[in-house]
Amino acid sequence: MEKSNIGLIGLGVMGSNLSRNIASKKFHISVYNRTTEVTDEFIKEHGNEYIHPAKTLEEFVDQLEVPRKIIILVKAGKAVDAVIEKLMPLLEKGDVVIDCGNSNFNNTLRRFDALKEKGLQFIGCGVSGGEEGALHGPSLMPGGTLEAWNTIKNIFESIAARDFSGGPCVTYIGDNAAGHYVKMVHNGIEYGVMQIMAEGYDILKNVYKLDPPKLSEIFKKYNDGKLKSYLFEISIEVLARKDEFEDGYLIDYILDRAAQKGTGKWTAIDALKQGEAIPTITEAVFARFISSHKDLRTNLSKKYQKEKIKTDMDLDTFVSTLEDALYAAMLSSYAQGYHLIREAAKENKWDIDIAEVSRIWEGGCIIRADILNVLHKAFEKANKDTHLFEIPELAKDLQRTIPLLRKTVTLGVQNGIPVSGLSTALSYFDAITSKQVPANFIQGLRDYFGAHTYKRTDKEGAFHTDWNI
Ligand code: 6PG
């Protein structure tokens, strides 16, 4: 048998779809799954001349051309370590192991070093786009050595989604865990954007008393404009879907408890570690936590009546106000995520090109949106340290849309609707664009109770005041 160009371990939905994608580009791929029946089933359904099943890991490794390139697509966490442990003794110097799961970047750092010690190459590759993306073209975010990347470049470029100019939605992100870090922040931004969208839906539904078909129509209108994106596109369907069991619409029967697998939380945790503010992303995680307390919320809702609905904006005015508000809040979420990537890159010595990151998010991934093309072009011209709010084209948009975000937040607050995503998107903007923030007051208090000292605006050095005099 001709040797396979690449191998894949783990034939869950993502693994089988990615294998089929690779085979469809005429690369020979060997596949292995711990449970052989799964492999048999996969071959029965999707087998073709490019897909080569293996019953044992030894057989699998033996089928691969050298240097071996092996994708692992098993549940993130212990399972990845278990596969690596079994694989290691079978591999040779220079072989490349590629973890395409949603692994925590700290684990990727550890695995990268462990494999390096054995002369093996490790790539932590973020994959976005869900099952459909894996099959038809995901956005891929590989991190590792450039040398390792070059061994898989042609395959990954062939299977990736396409950007706005037809280029592949994959680029070398940077050393060791840079790829998984960027994927983590992608998910953080995904959390932020979904939260602000949900809050817009909440206001439309509860202040303007709109039913799901009308809400779907509004989201369609948004998706036809500057908010055009995958998440808005799928909202149209999620809102319009009739329920299959009862009268009415499915959205009204879905329990309001948002689950999570952890990537949003990891983003928030790492931002705290880095000392960087990503309030909208963090609030999106908190909002999911609060949503999980359904019983407590239900009990408390009986004790505290919501205020009577008030608004002085007619529906048409609000629909257009919300469009601009969501646009500004979306930019703020991106700004927070981008800033975190930039700071983490400095800390970890990753040379991350944020224009390229924006480009590979143009297609395939969950946060793909027209705005990413704007960011891609803008960051190509900007210098590396540019904050998203410093970009002239966007600054012009923000000047116009921030007041509308302010109006939307006010409307939510006035009506007792939780708008933590929208309001943090706004307050992040307000704070980061303020020359003077009240941190002087905090410093004064710290010095008073703890002699922590403060710096002055007019003299060098650390000062302490004897507050008792
Ligand atoms: C993607 C998605 C994918 C997954 C999320 C969902 O980019 O394809 O982000 O990674 O759907 O992990 O995350 P939660 O379950 O935490 O919402």
Image (tube, rainbow, N blue to C red):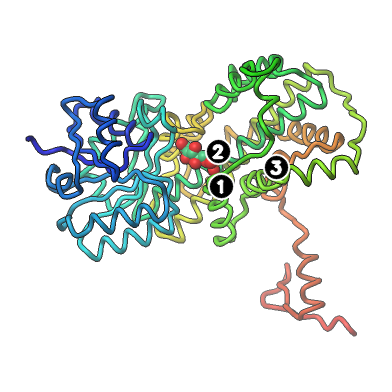
Measured in 3D between alpha carbons, the distance from the residue under mark 1 to the one under mark 3, in whole angstroms, is 15 Å
Q: Is residue 400 visible?
A: no
User: Which residue type carries mark 2?
Assistant: Glu
| For the residues bearing labels 2 and 3, Cβ distance under 8 angstroms | no
Residue at (29%, 47%) from the top-left corner? 98
Q: Which of marks 1 and 2 is nearer the N terminus?
A: 2
Q: Which amino acid does label 3 sit on?
A: Ser
Residue 297 versus residue 160 in the image, above or below: below
Q: Earlier in the sequence, mark 2 or mark 3?
A: 2
In the orientation shown, which residue stands out farthest toward the left? 1
Give how far across and how far down residue 110 sits, in percent.
37, 62
Foreground: disc 2 or disc 3: 3
Classify mark 1: residues with Cα within 10 Å, few (<14), some (14-19) or many (20+).
many
Q: Which residue lies furthest to the front in this view?
A: 37
Disc nearer the start of the sequence (1/3): 1
Left or right relative to 237: residue 171: left
Residue identified by numbered label 3: 291
Q: Which residue is drawn at 72% across and 78% down?
A: 452
Given the image, on which type of amino acid does mark 1 rest? Answer: Gly
Q: Is mark 1 on a helix, strand or loop?
A: helix
Q: Visible in this render: residue 329?
A: yes
Disc 1 C-beta below 8 A from ligand 1: yes
Residue 73: quarter of image: top left
Q: Distance between the residues labelled 2 and 3?
A: 17 Å
Residue 264 — which label? 1
Quarter of the rendering occupied by the N terminus? top left
Q: Residue at x 41, y 25 (%)?
A: 164
Q: In this view, does 458 lie to the left or right of 333?
A: right
Residue 171: x %, y % from top left: 34, 40
| Disc 2: which residue | 190
